[in-house]
Image (tube, rainbow, N blue to C red):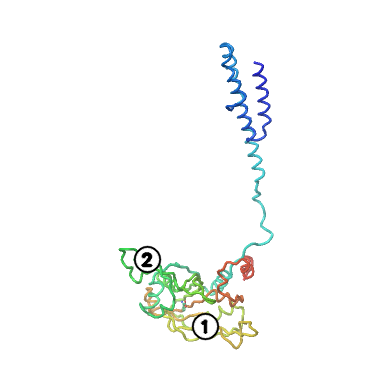
Amino acid sequence: MNNIDALKQELVETVKAANDIAALEDVRVTALGKKGKVTDMMKTLGSLAPEERKKIGQALNLLKDEISAEIDARAATLKKAALAERLHNEKMDVTLGPRPFPQGALHPITRTMEELAAIFADFGFSVAEGPEIEDDFHNFTALNFPAGHPARQMHDTFYLPDAAGEEGAEQAPADQKRLLRTHTSTVQVHVMQNRKPPIRVIIPGRTYRSDYDQTHTPMFHQLEGLMIDKTAHMGHLKGCLTELCKRFFEVDNLPTRFRPSFFPFTEPSAEMDIGCSRGKGELKIGEGSDWLEILGCGMVHPNVLKNCGIDAEEYQGFAFGMGVERMAMLKYGIPDLRTFFESDLRWLKHYGFGPQETF
Ligand code: PHE
């Protein structure tokens, strides 16, 4: 019996001395495992007299239970301490203030669209948006591109596979063929179908054409404008766009000119140029000997009004569309279009804008 007491004493000490869960596991094995000290003593029971065996056996079982309980209690204490330590070490101060230096920047495209929207807001235009995946009707037919019209070819359209591509499926009607919009003029159609004039909207957004070189990327941005009421005429169009360019390029006496052009959805159609000079390889916007093409525009074709459910006898209006990248390149002197979409952080740090920079 003395042996058992001594063993108990010894084991309780070692349990207390275990300073982490791994050490405590070792103690459990040394005490209660198959080759452990208590088990060893159990093995000697066979050689004892029956009375003695019973007494010692009971005492050993009791010891086993007691040591087990000691170990469990110690384990609970150690786990609690370990958790408290982790919580302390991984503590995070959510009240930490803002970083001392601003991180990140607005892409020149975002900034340019915001600048243009702010100017048009002063003219009473609101912003409209529409889907990038369109059908042939909204991209072409409604805009007065008849089937087989050569202007369709000029758009290098990305067509999407439709159900007709699957075996046994019926060919989709030509008007429903899905595509990535090649211009934001699609949204003119949605707006006219869904709103009653007077209409005054601008439509910024992504557009897609299968083209890639120094001045073309397969995805680019346009900003479209549409104005419909009973009296809008070419003079309003010219005044509105001239004022826009003066404000956007921050040049008060900016010469502008409108050259006749062709778009199926406007009649008459024009391209607008702004004055510039090119000296020592540097382009300067303003009075000068040169012209820069800046956007396409015109009076909305009566067929387009009719296709979109607007009475062409009663209403008329103008539309225009410009490339956002081109506007940004000209204003901020960015030489290569492709760099806009290379996600080079150094480029963005150089040409990007802090959110706090106002315009
Ligand atoms: N949608 C034309 C283009 O992508 C631009 C435009 C819009 C021209 C509206 C006239 C009127 O080239």
Q: Element under label 1?
A: strand
Question: Looking at the image, is mark 1 or mark 2 earlier in the sequence?
Answer: 2
Q: Against 243, is 62 above or below?
A: above
Farthest residue, direction bottom: 289
User: Considering depth in this image, is 107 or 3 the residue closer to the camera?
Assistant: 3
Amino acid beneath label 1? Met
Q: CA distance from mark 1 to mark 2?
A: 38 Å
Say left or right for 236 vs 72: left
Q: Quadrant of the C terminus?
A: bottom right
Image quadrant where one finds the N terminus: top right
Which mark, by number, is residue 21?
Answer: none
Q: Residues within 10 Å of mark 2 (few under 14, many from 20)?
A: some
Which residue corresponds to the image point at 67% horizontal and 28% vertical from the top-left? Answer: 14
Say whether residue 51 is left or right of residue 148.
right
Residue at label 1?
A: 272
Q: Amino acid at mark 2?
A: Asp
Q: Is mark 1 within 8 Å of ligand 1?
A: no
Nearer to us in this view, 2 or 35: 35
Q: Position of residue 301 (x, y in %)?
A: 41, 80
- Residue 190 location in percent, x, y? 42, 70
**For mark 1, does the 10 Å Cα neighbourhood hold few (<14), some (14 to 19), or many (20 or more) residues?**
many
Tag 1 near tag 2, CB within 8 Å: no
Q: Residue at x 65, y 37 (%)?
A: 81
Label 2, on which residue? 162
**Nearer the camera: disc 1 or disc 2:** 2
Above or below — where is 14 with respect to 52?
A: below
